[in-house]
Amino acid sequence: MKKTTILAMAVGLFVSAMSFTSCDKNNDNTMTVKPTLYDSLGGTTMVADPRNSGVMIEKGRLGIRSVVDSTIFVIAADSKLNSYFQPLLAEVTAGNTSGLTALSKSLTDFFCVATGAKNFTYGGKNMVAAHDPAQNPRMNGKSDNAAFDQFIADLVVGANQNKLPANLINSVGALVNTLRSQVVQR
Ligand code: HEM
């Protein structure tokens, strides 16, 4: 098999795993589109954004943003993980929250797209580059498996703080785990 075909198949597999979406062929040859994880998280239903008065936001995005922001605070307080975020934490300590705001948006965009949202794009680094200190000086050292496990544990704490149901936490955990080999680099 040609290298390009293998690459195309790998990309295809990755993309479908990332969005957790799938189609089932019915007996009468029609297709049923199963809801994505993003749909389960609230999907495109518009709700008031509690953070921006008068602004509406997709319920799925609001849920993801809430979990992301809670998780960032859990990580910041976690001595097993916060040293990796040293540049960010130094900025925040000095009163500069621009990097924090950018990370919150970037992670929110990433998880929206990864769970199957259609109305957002992720414009940040790919997961290998984002977690390679040589390509991202904001990553203070390479992650090992223990740090990755701790990241998932902190994500679960952040999700529980937002009362995400256990089945959705499991789905998000499974999704995150598909990225382990890209993030863990030592
Ligand atoms: C599957 C799990 C993970 C996902 C989906 C993820 C996702 C991301 C994303 C989207 C960014 C922003 C990249 C950009 O804007 O260009 C980022 C940055 C970063 N990630 Fe991760 N990450 C994961 C695991 C980890 C782990 C385990 C660590 C630490 C051991 C880590 C440490 C960082 C750091 C330090 C940054 C830079 C933060 C800053 O902007 O100051 N990440 N990550």
Image: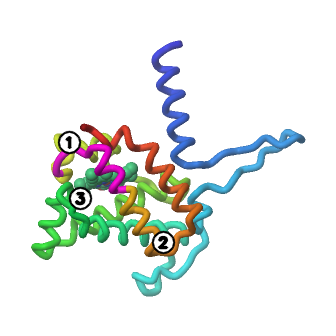
Q: Which tag, 1 or 2, sits closer to the chain's start?
A: 2
Check whether the beta carbons of the residues at disc 2 and disc 3 lie within 8 A of each other. Answer: no
Asked which secondary structure carries label 3, the reply is loop
Q: Could you tell me which secondary element the residue under label 2 belongs to? A: helix
Rendered location of residue 33, percent (x, y): 71, 50
Asked where in the image residue 186 lies, by quadrant, the reply is top left
- Give how far apart the Cα atoms at labels 2 and 3 are: 28 Å
Side of 124 where 79 appears, left or right: left
Give the residue at x 62% y 48%. 21
The answer to whether the beta carbon of the residue marked 1 is less than 8 Å from any atom of ligand 1 is: no
- Look at the image and give the residue range highlighted in magenta: 140-151
Which of marks 3 and 2 precedes in the sequence?
2
Report the residue marked by disc 2.
62
Residue farthest bottom in this picture: 53
Going by the numbered disc 2, the residue's amino acid type is Leu
Q: What amino acid type is highlighted by mark number 1?
A: Gln
Percent position (x, y) of residue 147? Answer: 29, 51
Mark 1 vs 3, N-terminal side? 3
Which residue ends up furthest to the right in the rendered image? 28
Q: Nearer the viewer, mark 2 or mark 3?
A: 3
The residue pinned by badge 3 equals: 80
